[in-house]
Amino acid sequence: MDEKELKILRKFYNSLCDAIRRILKKSTKNNSPIIIFFGLSIKKVHQTLQKCSIPSFQFNKDELSFYRLFDKKYIMEGEKSGEYIITPKGIWEYEKNIEKFGLNNFLDYIDKKYFSSLLKGQEKPLNPKEKIIIFSMIAVRSLSKGHSMDLSDEKNLSNYWTEIFNKTRDFLLKLRVITQIDYEEFWKEREDEVIGAIQYLMSRINKLPSKTKNIYHNPGRRKYYLEIPKNFDLIKINLKFLLNKVFNRIELNESQKEEILDFIKEISFDYSIYIFENNDDFYFNSEFDELLEDLILFQIV
């Protein structure tokens, strides 16, 4: 692109930036119009483009350069006859020439906007209620759709799950994973009706899927479970991730890890027979017990 073409393209580019500042009240100093348009409706973009067109007669002295830009599709005819606007290709070319915005900047934006955002939820810690729920589900081995926490009226299992949550709450308080305030507030919102309370509680933990890499599932009909694939490597990766989410704020000693292991075995033994129809699954055999023992004793924080 020669100097005359760049000069004309600059005029179109500046006209667009002025329209963005006037109409959209957005600055283009450190941002590209292309990126700004990404977050707008088509109607808003059209309103802005209508206000940045320039009559072609202004470029009569450089008519040849003007039409070269048109042939390269850096500018296009606007809504009004004889008036032209800069195109996305023109914006890109101009910003590349002045080294304001390039492919790497654009890809960084796409990454932050659409890809890295996938990880934002995973980076967030579990709150005390979520820790109690997730650790309860691990302990009782609600690790597949076939071993869901079922709070439907037909099953009438809410009392069992309430007991599991309460025992987990006691245990995590003992290990100082949760505070006394966390402990007291667990049922606070509906403490006068325990069975209603557990259903209310489970209906309000909407951020757990994103915080757990979608391991936590809520398919509806008052059913909830952790989806842990029956593959040794994936089991280790997913359970280690969840356990570290639960115990991320404390340094566990060997004695405490033994207590965790004993607690999990106790909860599974005491309750799984009552809340699940089938306990002959992989998650209830000796191989899985050994895997859990290795994870808890040697791999979690």
Image (cartoon, rainbow, N blue to C red):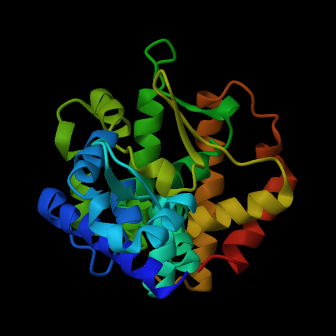
Relative horizontal placement of residue 83, taking residue 67 as reference (left or right): left
**Residue depicted at x 38% and y 38%:** 202
Q: Position of residue 22 (x, y in %)?
A: 12, 62
Q: Is residue 82 visible?
A: yes
User: Taking 225 as reference, is 70 above or below it?
Assistant: below
Quarter holding residue 124: bottom left
**Residue depicted at x 40% and y 64%:** 35
Q: Is residue 248 visible?
A: no
Q: Quadrant of the C terminus?
A: bottom right
Q: Which of the pair 190/7 is nearer the observer?
A: 7
Relative horizontal placement of residue 181, taking residue 73 as reference (left or right): left
**Residue depicted at x 77% and y 46%:** 283
Task: Give the farthest residue toward the top.
Answer: 154
Q: Position of residue 275 (x, y in %)?
A: 59, 30
| Count of marks overlaid on the render | 0
Q: Quadrant of the N terminus?
A: bottom right
Quarter holding residue 293: bottom right
Q: Position of residue 185 (x, y in %)?
A: 21, 54
Q: Position of residue 291 (x, y in %)?
A: 80, 63
Relative horizontal placement of residue 86, taking residue 21 as reference (left or right): right
Quarter holding residue 259: bottom right
Q: Which of the pair 75/82 is nearer the observer?
A: 82
Q: Which of the pair 186/213 is nearer the observer?
A: 213
